[in-house]
Image: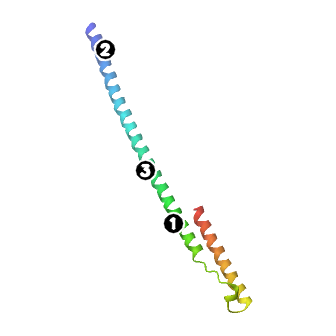
Amino acid sequence: MSTPLVHAFFVGRAIAEVAYERLEAGLTDALSELGKFDAEQRENLRQLVDEVMARAEREATIATQAQTTTAIVPLDLQTGDLQATIDDLRAEIAELRSELQRYRTRSTQ
């Protein structure tokens, strides 16, 4: 009677050890995958920040260039009548409004 009882004890002990080893391996794999995922997400976030900063810098450069290339002509040097000047100014205002609208559309995307 003691032989089957001893045998059952050792079988139970072996089951517990195998289950513990598999649980340990599974937990180790899960933590390893979690670490990989965390590292990948940090890298993706870093790349996103780099891309956003590069795009912001590019947009600022374009905006700065647009401001510096605008020519201001004194009124006494202008040729033509007053209505033509007003029409030109209205066209420039319309162009600036459309550019501002495009910028706002790009910024919200």
- Identity, as a three-letter code, of the amino acid under mark 1: Arg
Q: Nearer the viewer, residue 23 or 73?
A: 73
Identify the residue at horizontal 48%, vertical 59% (top origin): 51
Crowd rating for badge 3 (residues with CA inside 10 Å; few <14, some 14–19, many 20+): few
* Element type at mark 2: helix
2 or 1: mark nearer the eye: 1
Residue at image mark 2: 9
Q: Decide: is 50 above or below 31.
A: below
Q: CA distance from mark 3 to mark 2?
A: 51 Å
Give the quarter of the image for residue 12: top left
1 or 3: mark nearer the eye: 1
Q: Decide: is 52 above or below 92.
A: above
Q: Nearer the viewer, residue 38 or 46?
A: 46
Q: CA distance from mark 2 to mark 1?
A: 73 Å
- Identity, as a three-letter code, of the amino acid under mark 3: Glu
Counting residues from the start of the chain, the first of labels 1 and 3 encountered is 3
